[in-house]
Image: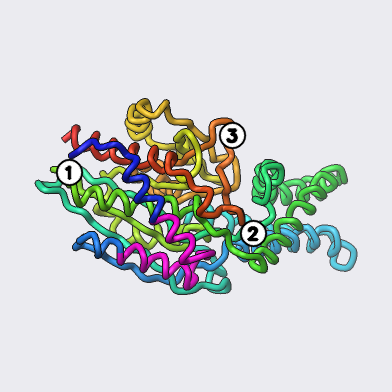
Amino acid sequence: MDDAPASSWAQRALAHAVTLTNASPGRGSATQAETQAAEYCRSQLVSLGVEDIRQQSFLGLRSIWLFFALTFGLALVGHASFWLLAGPAGWQISLLVSLVSFAMSAFLLWRKLTFRDYPLRASLPHGPSQNVVAVLPPTGGVRSRVVLVAHLDSHRSVWIFASDLLLKANLVIVPLAIYGVFIAPILYLLSSLSHLAIFSYLAIPLTLVHFLGWFTGATADLGPFSPGANDNASAAGSLLALAERLRQNPPAHTETWLVFTGCEESGCDGMRVFLDEYGKDLKEAVFLDFELVGIGERLGYLQNEGMLRKQSIPADVEKLSLEIGQAFGGLQPLKAASFGAFTENGLLLERGFRSLCLLAFQKDSLLLPEWHRLTDTASRLQVSALGLAHAFAWRLIQKLEGEN
Ligand SMILES: [Zn+2]
């Protein structure tokens, strides 16, 4: 394998990312624009001469926000039952209805945020979506596998992401809303059993947070999608550039999978479908999930994630990644378990796969550049950031080769 400078490949990644962003603007989950993006990636792979290209079609959730409207709506029923039902129905009935509502809300959150099927799923709008999967064989026998992942869809540009200040505030509010679904019923139960009103008063701020969550969820889809240049056309472009390089310089013993997924933003339906079909063959593979790799001066990775069940990067994958990252000034770790976000890496870790989520950061901030914003446009992408991500992935493949 060659070790050419990454810059020319980064230019190729940039060109793909710009095309994806501008030709399929606002690639919402399970939309026509998302399908166009999938078709673009598939046609590029065909033109590179990749022979083993597979398509997975599925029905994916169109909006994570309607899911949150459902769960926080149930939480609001729980609050309202406690405060309003006690008079007409008695405190036992009001407490029971409240606890049942919170339990349903909590169960839905638990199932969704650990990437499992959940009740009432069919009541939320789904649409046709797809994954494009390509397998690039090595020249010799397969001794290791690497799976490069990029999601094709972009998020709604909801107000909570609109500025750094709002984002920082919501890094507190969103976890409070989610944990509040579990805390509020305990406070109401304590209040009823102890007859101390202070416990129920403590739940009032959670009512406001749950109202905010429900209102945001119910109205989010009235707004436009983010153009999705950094999140995540940068990743899809990176995979296509790597595919081209791998076609020219195939590894001897490392099989490379390229996975372009649909419906990541609404809860990783695409990756679930991928793992259901191919996961059993990839238990030993190293997954590299590209997220927002198009802006910034340094590379980083998610050390952990998972709102309701923390999952950490496997120690051997972290060690390998940090070794590779030394060539790029080190890898910045980000602990994401405590804030309300997920990636396909979280699903991979949840299911026991060896996975790393690669990100790029600006030098003075740990906020993800242009994350879910209307300003996430192609003109902001930086070829230097794409070069770092490309070089990291290339070194990872070389490293796996070297270990054979
Ligand atoms: Zn993303």
Q: What secondary structure is found at the residue carrying circle 2?
A: helix
Q: CA distance from mark 3 to mark 2?
A: 34 Å
User: Would residue 282 be found to the left or right of residue 262 on screen?
Assistant: left
Residue 73 on image: x %, y %: 70, 63
Q: As displayed, is residue 37 above or below residue 287?
A: below
Residue of label 2: 105
Distance, label 1 to label 2, CA atoms, is 49 Å
Residue 34 shown in magenta: yes
First along the sequence among labels 1 and 2 = 2
User: Badge 3: how crowded within 10 Å, few (<14), some, or many (20+)?
Assistant: few
In front of the other: 2 or 214: 2
Can residue 178 be seen at all in this image of the molecule?
A: yes
Element class at badge 1: loop
The picture places residue 158, in percent across and down from the top left corner, at 65, 57
Which residue in the structure is indicated by mark 1?
251
Which residue is found at the position 87% from the left and 46% from the top?
A: 197
Q: Is mark 2 within 8 Å of ligand 1?
A: no
Q: Disc 3 and disc 1: Cα gap in Å?
A: 36 Å
Q: Residue at x 71, y 42 (%)?
A: 165
Q: Write the start and end of the magenta stretch as one range.
A: 16-43
Query: Residue flagged by tag 2: what amino acid is it?
Result: Ser
Could you tell me which secondary element the residue under label 3 belongs to? loop
Q: Which mark is residue 365?
A: 3
Determine whether label 3 and label 2 are within 8 Å by CB. Answer: no
Query: Which residue sits furthest right?
Result: 87
Q: Classify mark 1: residues with Cα within 10 Å, few (<14), some (14-19) or many (20+).
A: many
Query: Which amino acid lies under the numbered mark 3 shown in the image of this protein?
Result: Ser
